[in-house]
Amino acid sequence: MTLSFFDQFMSPTLLGIPLIALALTLPWVLFPKPSSRWLNNRVLTLQSWFINGFAQQIFQPINQEGHKWAALLTSLMIFLITLNMLGLLPYTFTPTTQLSMNMAFAVPLWLATVIIGMRNQPTHALAHLLPEGTPTPLIPILIMIETISLFIRPLALGVRLTANLTAGHLLIQLIATAALVLLPLMPTVAILTGALLLMLTLLEVAVAMIQAYVFVLLLSLYLQENV
Amino acid sequence: MPQLNPAPWFTILMFSWLIFLTVIPPKILAHTFPNEPTHQSTEKPKTDPWAWPWH
């Protein structure tokens, strides 16, 4: 019984079309390309504000070299937040629940930051493996610990996003099923479960936005260390 | 867990990066912001005080 709740995350197909393909291609109609008009419509203005504000916010602590990543990280933010939010609609497929996709973004981008650090400033990048003021006997073990924590970063990045969104969707499905099943039996409890479901949905909206932001923020921090 | 099925992993990787690299950056980069950001200077601007009557 429990296993069937995970079926919502299987890569679904409809008439032979993998729905993940539709879920990845169709959301971008919500982001029209701005024309050369001075004043755009409301949707475009709001998107512009968001993009500009986000880029300023993320790149403020990074030095000039890191600003080359502005287009990439802003695109990633729009990508993730759109996929997360649209996944909360009923019957939509959320590609970010797939570990494959999140690791596909986390590993190359993290690796890029590490390689940039090792190429441009190898001493500085390696110095991150040893915090300042470490007592001498602790140095070997601390370097091992820091190396492990370095390599765990992409894993954590991918799994964090996957697990948060999967857990959220699973909870929504479970509580919705509970509310539905309880409705003929104990209507009051069903209504309370419905209220719980409403609050959970609001939480999931917040989680969708926060998780996308955290993913990009952490990548920007890894960039900051290495650039 | 169906997400751990390794069969479509590479396809998903390729497809999502394809969309991420081709579709989204042109839309993002097309947003232009007409005002240049200015540094806030610590000096107060040298202006003459209001020396003429209101009307």
Image (tube, helix red, strand yellow):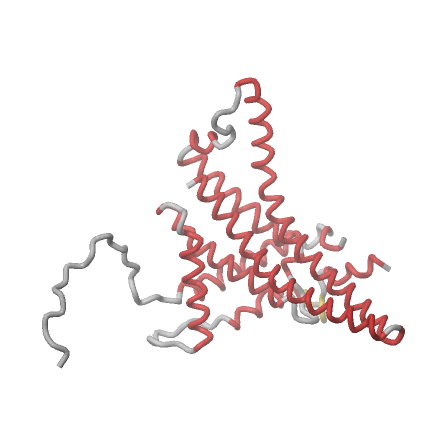
* Of A199 and A115, the residue lying toward us: A199
B20, A154: nearer the viewer: A154
Front-most of residues A72 and A53 = A53
Residue at figure coordinates x 71%, y 70% from the top left: A14
> Residue A95: horizontal and vertical position, in percent?
64, 60
- Residue A162 as seen in the image, left or right of residue A79: right
Residue at 89% from the left image edge and 73% from the top image edge: A185
Establish if B5 lies above or below A194. above
**Considering depth in this image, is A58 or B19 the residue closer to the camera?**
A58
Residue A106 position within the rendered picture, expressed as x and y whole percent measured from the top left:
57, 48
Query: Which image quarter: residue A204?
Result: bottom right
From the top left corner, tell me how far across and down residue A176 is, in percent: 77, 68
In this rendering, is residue A191 above or below B28? below
The vertical placement of A185 against B36, above or below, is below
**Residue A48 picture location, percent across and down:** 42, 68
Residue B11, located in which quarter of the rendered image? bottom right
Q: Indicate left or right for B50 with A144 as reference.
A: left
Q: Is residue B49 above or below residue A115?
A: below
Residue plotted at (61% across, 52% down): A102
Q: Residue at x 52, y 52 (%)?
A: A216
Q: Would residue A190 appear left or right of A134 to someone viewing this image?
A: right
The quadrant of the picture occupied by the C terminus of chain A is top left
The N terminus of chain A sits in image quarter? bottom right
Q: Residue furthest top?
A: A137
- Number of numbered markers: 0
Q: Residue furthest front?
A: B53
Q: Residue furthest bottom?
A: B55
